[in-house]
Image: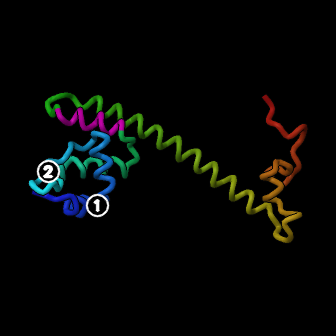
Amino acid sequence: MILIGELSRLTGVHVETIRYYERSGILHRAQRTENGRRSYGDRDVQRLTFIRHARKLGFELSTIRALLALQENPAESCQEVINITRGHFATVQDRITRLIALRDELRRMVEICGGGRVAECQIIDALNGSVGTNGAKPQGNGTPAD
């Protein structure tokens, strides 16, 4: 018998998160002791460890639920697991690409600003759309071309 505090310690998942996972159905509802305390077993530790690791990798709870369901059929092909993971990988790659572009844009904004007063701040001007990140005033009406 493992109580919720011990389950939290063993898995690194906060008690409130464990309760949330139970309410959402991703973690089976705990059995209760005679005095009403939640009681867990080794399978709950394994399942919660799986959930925590999948969350750290950025999987959404709905996807983790699907992966857990697939895990219940160990004799089946893992092709669906591969497909799910490839999809998540593509999402992560896209996010990384967008973050790199964001980093580069912020770096350019910092590099074009010569310091001084806010009234002449190139970063403020860039955020207002009155200066491009290359330091030049934008051409036209300031809106992107279609």
What secondary structure characterizes most of the magenta part?
helix
Amino acid on which disc 2 is placed:
Arg
**Which mark identifies residue 12?**
1
Protein image colouring: rainbow
Q: Name the residue under label 2.
A: 32
Q: What element carries label 2?
A: strand
| Circle count | 2
In the rendered image, residue 91, in percent from the top left (x then y), is placed at: 47, 39
Q: In this view, does 96 lie to the left or right of 127?
A: left
Q: Determine if the magenta segment contains residue 64.
A: yes
Looking at marks 2 and 1 on the same chain, the residue that comes earlier in the sequence is marked by 1
Amino acid on which disc 1 is placed:
Gly
In the rendered image, residue 84, in percent from the top left (x then y), is placed at: 35, 33
| Image position of 25 with respect to 75: above or below | below
Asked whether the beta carbons under mark 2 and mark 1 sit within 8 Å of each other, the answer is no
In the rendered image, residue 122, in percent from the top left (x then y), is placed at: 83, 59
Q: Determine if the magenta segment contains residue 68.
A: yes
Residue nearest the observer in this picture, 28 or 92: 28
In the rendered image, residue 74, in percent from the top left (x then y), is placed at: 15, 34
| Image position of 104 with respect to 84: above or below | below
| Image position of 94 with respect to 121: above or below | above
Categorize mark 2 by other alpha carbons within 10 Å: few (<14), some (14-19), many (20+): few
Q: Is mark 1 on a helix, strand or loop?
A: loop
**Quarter occupied by the C terminus:** top right
Q: Quadrant of residue 111?
A: bottom right
Categorize mark 1 by other alpha carbons within 10 Å: few (<14), some (14-19), many (20+): few
Residue nearest the observer in this picture, 114 or 68: 68
Q: Give the range drawn in magenta.
A: 62-72
